[in-house]
Image (cartoon, rainbow, N blue to C red):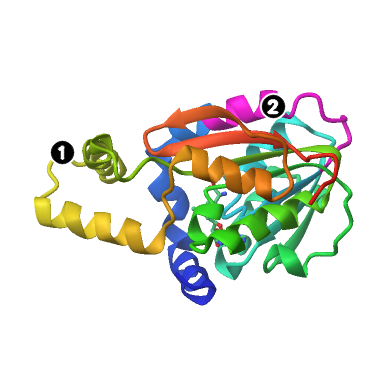
């Protein structure tokens, strides 16, 4: 999908996004729990870059876990960002956040962040070089040794296991037992067209090419895989 279509798609989902994810909460809880450990070495007053924050699920977790951190929240969908901002207001940490509506390249290039997250974001970038550029844009904003946590849908889509797992995955996403073969095929096509579901080794190569040390996989649930990686010494 092109940027405009992605932004519009998330603008449309913004009001219902949290409700859709409520049932899938255990997936996020496990990811966030582990992510908290990855970032536990960062300074108590760290500056943190949250890329593609959506309605702010990971932001709320991190703001609660690390009460002195300051966040720069980057999100291209105005409607998603508004929901995210509302949550931060209600939870009382909005004054620790700077909200940036747009993409990363329009954010000042300051190499100032101790850590960054991009959860379920890079998968929407279909072109390999652009996706590497996305990671590079994060790396160049991190301090030396700064840590990234990234997660994406990732699997070897050519393996026989993918067919089986995809069906299980969609049953879970839909909260339904029966998915017709036609429906499964439509979903499979949409995943193949709109989301770059790539084998873990390929995503790892792209993160590394974007200026990070070899990523460590730390989370896998269904199709979602998570990695952490420190900025490489040369940065980008
Ligand atoms: C699936 S949502 C995930 C939101 C949040 N990270 C979470 O885990 O709940 C993906 C978000 O990334 C944003 N996004 C898509 N492409 C992006 C890009 N190139 N840069 C930054 N954000 C992007 C979308 O607008 C959307 O809010």
Q: Is residue 151 visible?
A: no
**In this picture, is 137 found above or below 59?**
below
- Mark seen at residue 177: 1
Nearest to the observer: residue 41 or residue 19: 41
Which of the 4 image quarters holds residue 169? top left
Q: Is residue 191 magenta?
A: no
Q: Quadrant of residue 9?
A: bottom left
Instruction: Provide residue 89's location: percent of width, then percent of height.
Output: 70, 52
Residue in the foreground of this view, choosing between 25 and 230? 230
Q: CA distance from mark 1 to mark 2?
A: 36 Å
The span shown in magenta is 31-47
Whole-percent x and y of residue 103? 67, 66
Residue found at x 54% / y 59%: 128
Label 1 environment density (alpha carbons within 10 Å; few <14, some 14–19, many ≥20) = few
- Residue for badge 2: 38
Q: Earlier in the sequence, mark 1 or mark 2?
A: 2
Quarter of the rendered image showing ligand 1: bottom right
Task: Give the secondary structure at mark 2.
Answer: helix
Nearer the observer, disc 1 or disc 2?
2
The mark total stands at: 2
- Which residue corresponds to the image point at 11% horizontal and 57% vertical from the top-left? 182
């Amino acid at each position: 999908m092109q940027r405009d279509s992605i932004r519009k798609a998330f603008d449309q989902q913004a009001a219902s996004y949290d409700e859709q994810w409520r049932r899938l909460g255990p997936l996020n809880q496990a990811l966030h729990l582990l992510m908290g450990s990855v970032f536990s070495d960062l300074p108590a007053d760290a500056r943190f870059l949250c890329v593609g924050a959506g309605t702010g699920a990971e932001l709320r977790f991190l703001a609660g876990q690390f009460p002195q951190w300051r966040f720069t929240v980057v999100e291209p969908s105005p409607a998603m960002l508004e929901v995210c901002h509302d949550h931060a207001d209600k939870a009382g940490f909005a004054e620790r956040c700077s909200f940036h509506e747009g993409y990363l390249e329009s954010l000042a290039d300051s190499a100032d962040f101790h850590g960054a997250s991009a959860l379920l974001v890079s998968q929407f970038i279909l072109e390999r070089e652009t996706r590497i550029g996305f990671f590079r844009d994060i790396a160049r904003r991190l301090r030396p040794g700064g840590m990234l946590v990234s997660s994406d849908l990732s699997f070897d889509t050519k393996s026989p296991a993918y067919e089986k797992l995809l069906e299980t995955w969609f049953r879970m996403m839909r909260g339904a037992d029966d998915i017709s073969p036609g429906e499964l095929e439509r979903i499979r096509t949409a995943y193949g067209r709109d989301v770059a579901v790539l084998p873990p080794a390929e995503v790892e190569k792209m993160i590394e090419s974007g200026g990070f040390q070899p990523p460590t996989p730390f989370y896998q649930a269904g199709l979602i895989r998570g990695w952490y990686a420190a900025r490489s010494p040369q940065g980008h």
